[in-house]
Image (cartoon, coloured by chain):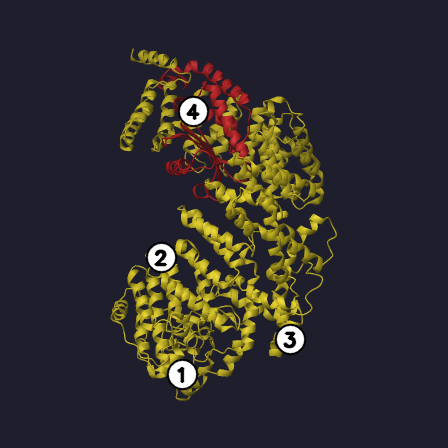
Amino acid sequence: MIQAVMVISTQAKPRLLKFYNFQPPEKHQDLVRSVFQLLSARPDSVSNFVEVDSIFGPGTKMVYKHLATLYFVFVFDSSENELAMLDLIQVFVETLDRCFKNVCELDIVFNFNKLHTILDEMILGGQVIETSSEQIMKSVEEIARLEKQSSTTSLIPKSISERFSR
Amino acid sequence: MEQLRTIGRELAMGSQGGWGQSKEFLDLVKSIGEARSKAEEDRIIARELEHLKRRLADPDVPRRKMKELLLRLVYAEMLGHDASFGHIHAVKMTHDESLPLKRTGYLAVALFLDERHDLVILVVNTIQKDLRSDNYLVVCAALTAACRLIGEEAIPAVLPQVVELLAHPKEAVRKKAVMALHRFYQRSPSSVSHLVSNFRKRLCDNDPGVMGATLCPLYDLILEEPNAYKDLVVSFVNILKQVAERRLPTSYDYHQMPAPFIQIKLLKILAVLGSGDKQASGHMYTVLGDIFRKGDTASNIGNAILYECICCISSIFPNPKMLEAAAETTSKFLKSDSHNLKYMGIDALGRLIKINPDIAEEHQLAVIDCLEDPDDTLKRKTFELLYKMTKSTNVEVIVDRMIEYMINITDHHYKTEIASRCVELAEQFAPSNQWFIQTMNKVFEHAGDLVNIRVAHNLMRLIAEGFGEEDEGADSQLRSSAVDSYLRIVGEPKLPSSFLQIICWVLGEYGTADGKYSASYIIGKLCDVAEAHLTDDTVKAYAISGILKIFAFEIALGRKIDMLPECQTLVDELSASHSTDLQQRAYELQALLGLDKRAVESAMPADASCEDIEVDRNLSFLNSYVQQALENGAAPYIPESERSGVISVGSYKSQEQQETSAHTLRFEAYEMPKPSLALATSQVSMSTPPTDLVPVPDPGYYKEDHQTSRSQPSGDAISGEFGVKLRLDGVQKKWGRPTYSSSTPSSSASSQQATNGGSYSDGGGSTSSQARESSYGSKRQQGTEISAEKQRLAASLFGSAAAKADRKAQASRKASKENASAEKATASSAAPQPVKEQVIPAVPPPDLLDLGDEPVSSSPPSADPFSQLEGLLGPASATPVVSGAPATSTSKAPDLMSIFSDDVPTGATSGSTDPALGDVNLIKGATTAAAKKGPSLQDALQKDATARQVGVTPTGNNPNLFKDLLG
């Protein structure tokens, strides 16, 4: 299964963290730091795979892709295929690109909740459920549409709405 | 009015970004981005958190705004700041009616909390309600949260709804319900075990996406219990066939590949189901062949499928045609320029050589390129491959390479791993003891603190026991070379502790043995070690014991040596040490210096570290003394079981005292050791009141015992011979598990050669050199641009592969004709044969190697050369050996038991010699004088036999080259 999805900037700032095996929040920064150290030490022309037993436990591997100012990192165990994971990153990035039109780091920073939405459509409980970026986009747009519909009533302060609902 | 203004601002913000991020958030991100230091960033976020805390608690915040506040909280937490105060707000938000807020709430909750968190209980109820919602998006959000937050106890609360959702009209919901169920299964298999049939049902779902999702839980289930799902093999093959033939809607295509993720999952499942199952594998060959034919090596995902195919083929029942296709694809991977593909190629090669080791030979240069590649991942993968293909013929090159690499890496985790692999390979395949010791020295020098202390003990043991043959000359040469090398190294700074322990032990034991170095020189060195490592008590203990031994040997030789001033300082310092152990050793040294030659000789005999310490547990030698005491009117001993309540002080003088003394206080003071009573008194003084003891060694008894328990862990020379009291941990472990002896087969091989007609060792030698030549030849044809060095490396790594195969074929033809299958199959099934041949002369007990149910080669060696030899020498012990394997194993059983029993000193199961072990510490000294070092031939032979037994124990777990075939 997939254990973690991370997006880290080349400045070592986390842009998206999602762990499918719970990691206590205190540990997140350590993980980001050790992953970043590993990645920044790797030259450009080498493979996209790293074995990360020392960070995520025995048998874990990491596939990453370095795009512009971001590292996209997937951590997973032996039940996944490395090359396939590399393509999953591709799917993820393609979807982001469709979503934001020429995605850049700023889009990701400001819309990290949308990234979560996209990721939830792709991966659930550490398993891949959807790999077509078109399909993912459709679901995400559907969600956006329905959210807009129902959000018109939400401008009332909660103290008032609570009073109403009682 | 104020509110209206807020609303107005909100509306304005809403138009700014599609997702309604406010200016505040933009400013926050911007100021973090511009922060010049971590401290500044922390300050900004701390301020932000203060602000959020205030706003979240404010009832007049619009709910829409709440969403944004929560997202900012999530953001702060992602940056590593504690936002736990907001968790409750996230939980509250999941209760909200509006979809965006609910979704945001779920998102935040899933990121903040885990199933063990206290607040989760507040969410379970909401999830339960939302799973019943009409809005499928709400259901999806609830399912996503359920995957994350529902722990074992909460599963029953939501399970009925999730199962209902398996039949939901929306396929997105069905898919997520399957995944949620899978997640529940991972959390607690028992709670959903009755629902497993649902996964089978979903496999027939109309929607291929749901079917694909179902493969995930099925894969896990099949991994657990493949046999329960054999009936699905045909269905899986059919699905795979349909997918590969593009019967799915084109929306499932990815980069022109039909549903590649489904294909990969299916191939993984088939690999498990077909493993070792000829019939099931039979169904798969056609579709696998199809996939290979259609394989697209241009795209990444195409290669992913091909790689998965190779994995599948190497896992299922082998088929020559398939293997050929797999090997071909592997070579494409290896020849590729992409590092990713090379990595996959190396991995695939590692899988294929398990079935057919010859495949590696073809790719030798590619493998060596990978080994020298700057890519660390690739390098490590290649080392893993080399580790899998190590044999006695290429072990030197491989281990040298590994050590070279090990020295240069800083990653502790991997360094530990590679060091332990070096040790394992060296123990398993070492061509000579000399090489083994040198290799171990290197490993210890560079990674000493990372390897198991057991390895250090094995090394010491090897140096002490030598080749296990009668050739004393070679042994002493080995030792003096070890001493030489250690004297060279010892001055270097920063040696790991365990390595220093070895050095001190070896210098103490053998430093002066060959007369090359003077005693005071060695003592000086040992003093330096102790001084240089003030904080390491263990090293100091080893050093002082080494000094003690040197003194003892010198006194025994009748030489007078002066106490060096630095040595005196050391002794004085240690006598006042806080560590009782060090104190003890220092006092021992001082006491020893006062003894006369004869006493010292028996207390610390030279080169006796391998001798056994026999312990008479019943203290029978005291009988006469007890008798005398009784006659003189002493109270008779009453065993503890018969005593009623009152424990008399007198009972401490009883035989049982070893046990009681372990638990209770001792009331009597120790008496001063009496040097005139030789060592026995002083040695036992620790545990027994000296008045109780009169050493009455019974030579006959010991002699007899000596024979049967030859290989019992001979105590540490220090603790054993000078038993006053020593570090007990060292005693047992030092002679710990004798796995190192796997290097000794080299010694036995020479004698095997004589009688076995060279079928193993002889043939191996000649063919390997031939093969090497031939591989050279073939390479010259390949081209001249390959450097000579690389070729040499290739030859040393792989050249032997051909030889090995040749030999195997020979062996198989010679040994049995039972395999009349295809040629490839013969070659591979012959793999275990050499092992067997090696094993037979050693005759281990069947339970160790589990050879019992195997067709042990149809023509066993007509007579074991060793048994013949033994027959000549000692009829008593030889007879059982001649009578064949089973008999031998039983006769050897106690030996073997005692070898292993040192790991479990208290185990009562390990036979006659074991109880003695428990007491070694307490009364070990009493019998030392009796244990003589007798270089009897029979002893040596027996020792050798044991060594060979040990040499083939499966502790080293050979990188399962033969696992599939043996299983």
Assign the N terminus of chain B to one quadrant of the image. Answer: top left
Do marks 1 and 2 share a subunit?
Answer: yes
Image-based side of B641 in relation to B848, left or right: left
Q: Decide: few, some or many residues near mark 3? Use Cα within 10 Å; few <14, some 14-19, many ≥20.
A: some
Task: In the rendered structure, find residue B879 and report the number of the disc placed on it.
Answer: 3
Above or below B681: residue B359: above
Q: Amino acid at mark 1?
A: Val
Percent position (x, y) of residue B74?
Answer: 38, 28
Percent position (x, y) of residue B615?
Answer: 46, 75
Q: Please give the chain letter of the residue carrying mark 1.
A: B
Secondary structure of residue under mark 2: loop
The residue nearer to you, when weighing B804 against B197, is B804
Q: Amino acid at mark 3?
A: Thr
Q: Nearer the viewer, mark 3 or mark 1?
A: 3
- Which residue is at 63% across, 76% downward? B871
Task: In the rendered structure, find residue B694 and report the number of the disc placed on it.
Answer: 1
Q: Which chain is red?
A: A
Percent position (x, y) of residue B851?
Answer: 64, 60
Q: Is residue B311 visible?
A: yes
Q: Is residue B657 visible?
A: no
Residue holding disc 4: A113
Q: Decide: few, some or many residues near mark 4? Use Cα within 10 Å; few <14, some 14-19, many ≥20.
A: some
Image-based side of B214 in relation to B555, left or right: right
Do marks 1 and 4 share a subunit?
Answer: no
Q: Amino acid at mark 4?
A: Asn
Residue at the farthest front position: B784
Q: Please give the chain letter of the residue carrying mark 4.
A: A
Q: Which chain is yellow?
A: B
State the image quarter where residue B562 is shown.
bottom left
